[in-house]
Amino acid sequence: KITWLSPLISGFSAGLSFTLDSRDSNLFKTKHDKLDNFTEKDDFAHSSAYSQNIVTGGIAYEFGAPDCFNAKISVSGWLGKGKSCCSDVEVQNVRAYNLGLILGYADFKASFGYTDNGKSLLAKKYATQDVSYTFDPSENYNINEASVGLKEEADSGKIYSIGMAYIFDKLSISAGYFRSVVKFSGHEKATADIISIAAEYKFDKVFSSYIEYDNIQTNTCDRARAYGSASHQSTIGKNRANAVMIGAKFNF
C-alpha cells in the first residue's frame, strides 16, 4: 500500500493511496478454478471476492478555533477492480464513497457520517424469480435456484453514524449510534443497529482508562438467510447482544 498525505494548507488537507491487491494470501493458496461443481465455485466466489488496483482519495476542510465554534468536513471515495477466486464467476467493481462532518464548540463535539458501498464486489448473477421468502431452516437451499440469489436492486450496504462527546478537564463522555442497511432486493434487507456509550479518564499525559457499553441489534431478512444457507454461511433472523469493555491506554 502506498499512501500520500498533504500538509494542512489554509484549512485544506488531502490524501491519496493505492493498494495493489486486497486478497488474503493464506486464503488463496488453492486454485479454486478446478472445483468440479459450479455451485461450490459460485458459493466460494460470493464469500471470497476481493479487489485489485484500489485507489482511495479524499479531501477535508476545517475551520474555526478550538475554544469556540469549529468544524471539519471530509469527502472520500475508493475505486477498484472487483475479482473472484473463480474465473467464470464475475463480481462488480468497487465503487464507494464516504461523507463526514465534525462540529465542535468549546468542549462539545458532534460527528455525522455516511458511507455508500454501492454494489461493490456483489456477484453479477441475479435471481430471475422475484420470491419473498419465509425461511425454513430445514430446507436445503441451492445458490443456482432461480429464486435464491440477489435481486438487481441489491447493494453492498449503506452506513449511517452519529456521535456526541463532551470533554471535561480529565474526563470525556461520548455516545454514538451506528446503522448499516444491506439490500438483498428492493424490499428485503439486513440491518445492524449499534448504540455505544463510553467514558474515558486521563490520569496524566501517559495513562488513561476507559469503559464502553454497546447495545447491538441485527435483523436479517428471509432472502438473506436463504442466500446464506445456500452459500454455506450461518445466518440469524433477529439477534441482540450487549457488550461491556474496560481497558487502559498508554501514550508515549
Image: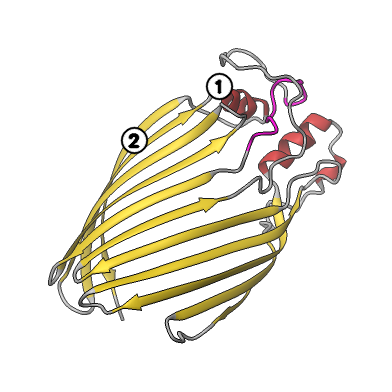
Q: Which residue is mark 2?
A: 241
* Residue 97 image-quadrant placement: bottom right
Closer to the camera, 195 or 28?
195
Q: Residue at x 51, y 32 (%)?
A: 190
Residue 88 falls within the magenta-colored stretch: no
Residue 33 against residue 231 in the figure, above or below: below
Q: Residue at x 14, y 70 (%)?
A: 170
Residue 50: x, y in percent? 69, 52
154 lies left or right of 13: right
Residue 11 against residue 1 in the figure, above or below: below
Q: Which residue is mark 1?
A: 222
Q: Quadrant of the N terminus?
A: bottom right
Q: Residue at x 70, y 47 (%)?
A: 49
* Residue 22 image-quadrant placement: bottom right
Residue 12 against residue 177 in the figure, above or below: below
Residue 39: x, y in percent? 79, 30
Q: Main secondary structure of the magenta part?
A: loop
Name the residue type under label 1: Asp
Residues drawn in magenta:
143-154
Q: Secondary structure at mark 1?
A: helix
- Outermost residue, left direction? 169
Name the residue type under label 2: Ala
Eye-nearest disc, 2 or 1? 1
